[in-house]
Structures are given as C-alpha cells and as structure tokens.
Image (tube, coloured by chain):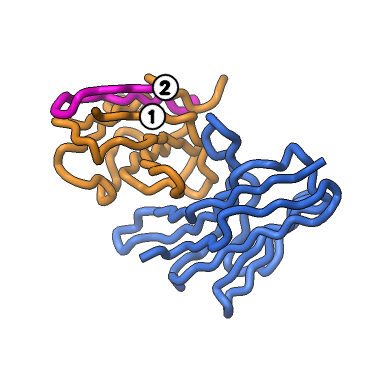
C-alpha cells in the first residue's frame, strides 16, 4: 500500500517553461513534506520542503504547493533549466507511536528539460 | 568535510555469504538512517540511529539484517546468508538532528548471484 504516490513516471518540458511535478498521499498523519532530487549515480539531495501548516513554500525557481484537503502537493520549477533534469522524489514524514520519525518516499519521477 | 560516504560502492556476492556495508556519515550528524532502494522505487526505510542508539529497526525485513553504530559515528549494515532478493541499492543518510532533511550517500549496489 503506497502512502506516497507519484503517478507520472516521467515528464519532459522545454527549457524556460514551467515543470510541475505532482505527488499524492494517503496518510493524514504526515506533517512535513520534502522533495529530493537525484542525479544518476548519486544519492538523493534535499531540494525543498513544506510543513503541513503551510500551503506554499518558495525558494528561488522552486515552489512547493500543499493542498491538505486533497492530500496533494506539487513542485513547480520555473523557469526550467537543462540542469534540472533528474529524478525527483516526493517524501512525507510522520512520527510513530513510539516517537520515531519516519520518511516515506514516492517512486520518483524523471524530469527531462530539453534545451 | 565531504558528504555521506558509503563503501563499497558495488558489492557482488554469492548467495549464502554474509556482507557488511559501511556508512560514514557527515561529521557531527547525530541521526543516521539506512534505506533500501529497488530499481524504479523510492528509498524504503530499514533502520535509524540516534547517536549510537538504534531507535527504530522496524524496516529491517528479517533477522538476517542487522545494523550497528557502536560509537555514534560510522555504521555497518550486515546481511547474513544473503539471498538473491536482497539485491538492491542500499543507501545511508544522516542528518544533524531529527527534524532536519536527510543527506544521502551514493549508496552501495549489492548484487547477490
């Protein structure tokens, strides 16, 4: 049972245009959401995050939107650049009854930005 | 200095052998996590340390898997009597505290033949 879903395996956009990466989740206990970016042969690197008490967080070209009622978040990249081509993972955090922090990752989505 | 370091980068072993995967977290990071990532999937939680204490090992698939972090720094993930289904990318991550984003290593690609 996937708690964090990235339903589109890939996205291709033109340089300069907007990239929109979507993520849906099912667990209401998630309180914090993160996006990681992964280049080939490297580990995922943290990109941007948002607390569940907010609906938007912006950092330069990257903006994450959270719609709690729809259990949906999205990452917007504008303008997209060829260097943004990577696999993007959506992740969500919750705490177990024992107080242990857990991160649940989606399957990832491959973004290709064409020059 | 550098990021999270994992070794070996690649490990090929025969079924039934034991393997030990090493993680050297970023200096000063108190939290250390082990994840397993299958092809086409996101990382899946295995176990978590806060300093030297293993706080959560609920993600370890069975008792062939164990991990330790005896001095609160370097960690070793050990898989005994490896099976082909253990083949995956094993990723270590660390963070300065529980509420900080994770810093991932480049992983160890384990292949069990």
Work out which quarter of the rendered image holds the C terminus of chain B and state it. top left
A8 left or right of B27 in image: right
Image position, residue A93 (x, y; %): 47, 58
Tell me what residue is drawn at x 46 percent, y 23 percent: B5
Image position, residue B36 (x, y; %): 36, 41
Residue under label 1, please give it: B109
Work out which quarter of the rendered image holds the N terminus of chain B and state it. top right
Tell me what residue is drawn at x 23 percent, y 36 percent: B84
Chain under callout 2: B
Query: Helix, strand, or loop for circle 1?
Result: strand
Q: In this rendering, is residue B5 above or below B67?
A: above
- The front one of A35 and B85 is B85
- The front one of B16 and A103 is B16
- The front one of A46 and B72 is A46
B24 left or right of B100 in image: left
- Magenta stretch contains residue B19: yes
B24 left or right of B69 in image: right
Residue range of the region highlighted in magenta in the rendering:
B10-28
Query: Helix, strand, or loop for circle 2?
Result: loop
Instruction: Using the numbered discs, state the Cα–Cα distance from disc 2 to disc 1 in whole angstroms.
Output: 6 Å
Contact check, label 2 and label 1, Cβ < 8 Å: yes
Quadrant of the rendered image containing residue B64:
top left
Residue under label 2, please give it: B9
Q: Which residue extends farthest bottom? A: A69
- The front one of B91 and B28 is B91
Identify by letter the chain in blue: A
Identify by letter the chain in orange: B
Can residue B60 be seen here? The reply is yes
Residue B7 has which mark? none
Badge 1 density bin: few <14, some 14–19, many ≥20, Cα 10 Å? many
Image position, residue A67 (x, y; %): 63, 73
């Amino acid at each position: 049972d996937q708690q964090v879903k990235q339903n589109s395996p890939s996205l291709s956009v033109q340089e300069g245009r907007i990239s929109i990466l979507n993520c849906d989740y099912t667990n209401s206990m998630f309180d914090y959401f993160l996006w990681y970016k992964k280049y080939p042969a490297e580990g995922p690197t943290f990109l941007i995050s948002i607390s569940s008490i907010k609906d938007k967080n912006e950092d330069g070209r990257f903006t994450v939107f959270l719609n709690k009622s729809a259990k949906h978040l999205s990452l917007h990249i504008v303008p997209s650049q060829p260097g943004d081509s990577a696999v993007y993972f959506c992740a969500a955090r919750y705490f177990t009854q024992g107080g242990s922090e857990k991160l649940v990752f989606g399957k990832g989505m491959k973004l290709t930005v064409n020059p | 200095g550098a990021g999270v370091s994992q070794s070996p980068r690649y490990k090929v072993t025969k079924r039934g052998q034991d393997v030990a995967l090493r993680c050297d977290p970023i200096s000063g990071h108190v939290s250390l996590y082990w994840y397993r990532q299958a092809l086409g999937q996101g990382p899946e939680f295995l176990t978590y340390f806060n300093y030297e204490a293993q706080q959560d090992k609920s993600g370890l698939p069975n008792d062939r898997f164990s991990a330790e972090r005896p001095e609160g720094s370097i960690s070793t993930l050990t898989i005994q009597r490896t099976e082909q289904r253990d083949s995956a990318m094993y990723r270590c991550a660390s963070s300065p505290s529980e509420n900080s984003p994770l810093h991932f290593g480049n992983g160890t690609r384990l292949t069990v033949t």
